[in-house]
């Protein structure tokens, strides 16, 4: 299993419009192209998860994640905000890169935690923030994930 398998170009935004943590969570949920009710439920679940502790893992990266009935399989999305958002990250620095993970409550394939772990591993690589900043297209993100082979 590699991270690249879970990402698609249509769930990547290299220019998030959001200016707040809540708006980023809403915009990321929107990348999954759910209906309005499902999107609202997902936003509430992501917000609830953030109350347990920020998913900002440092190096300008956050990995908001939750389990929710609004999806029937593991879904991921990526968003970038060049100016950064105060996301209460563990290093107290603004977050520019957001990897969203949503999985159903019961998941036969059990991919949620392995994908979360792989994204955390990816986020810790020293060259990743600069490489994410340099992305020009969604395909560039997919190529970076393939190159890293995580």
Image (cartoon, helix red, strand yellow):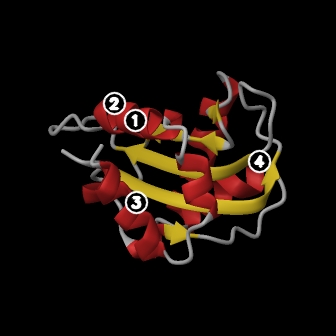
Q: Which mark is residue 113?
A: 2
Q: Where is mark 1, residue-wise?
A: 116
Q: Quadrant of the N terminus?
A: top left
Q: Position of residue 43 (x, y in %)?
A: 61, 50
SS class of the residue under badge 2?
helix
Q: Residues within 10 Å of mark 2 (few under 14, many from 20)?
A: few
Q: Position of residue 45 (x, y in %)?
A: 57, 40
Please tell me which residue is depicted at 78% across the width and 32% down the height of the picture. Answer: 88
Q: Nearer the viewer, residue 41 or 1?
A: 1
Please tell me which residue is depicted at 15% across the width and 37% down the height of the picture. Answer: 108
SS class of the residue under badge 4?
helix
Q: Nearer the viewer, mark 4 or mark 1?
A: 1
Q: Nearer the viewer, mark 3 or mark 4?
A: 3
Find out whether the residues at labels 3 and 2 contact each other: C-beta distance under 8 Å. Answer: no
Please tell me which residue is depicted at 45% across the width and 65% down the height of the picture. Answer: 141
Q: Residues within 10 Å of mark 4 (few under 14, many from 20)?
A: some
Q: Where is mark 3, residue-wise?
A: 144
Q: N-terminal of the two: label 3 or label 2? A: 2
* Separation (CA) of disc 4 from disc 1: 20 Å
Q: Which mark is residue 21?
A: 4
Please say if 8 is above or below 42: below
Q: Is residue 120 in view?
A: yes
């Amino acid at each position: 299993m590699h991270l690249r398998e879970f990402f698609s170009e249509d769930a990547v935004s290299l220019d998030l419009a959001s200016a707040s943590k809540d708006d980023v969570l809403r915009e990321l949920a929107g990348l999954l192209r759910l209906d309005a009710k499902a999107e609202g439920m997902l936003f509430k679940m992501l917000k609830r998860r953030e109350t347990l502790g920020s998913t900002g893992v440092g190096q300008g990266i956050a990995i908001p994640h939750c389990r929710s009935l609004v999806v029937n399989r593991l879904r991921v999305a990526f968003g970038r905000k060049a100016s950064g958002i105060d996301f209460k990250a563990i290093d107290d620095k603004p977050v520019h890169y957001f990897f969203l993970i949503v999985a159903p409550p019961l998941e036969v394939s059990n991919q949620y935690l392995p994908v979360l772990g792989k994204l955390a591993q990816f986020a810790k690589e020293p060259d990743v923030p600069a490489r994410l900043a340099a992305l020009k297209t969604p395909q560039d993100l997919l190529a970076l994930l393939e190159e890293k082979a995580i």
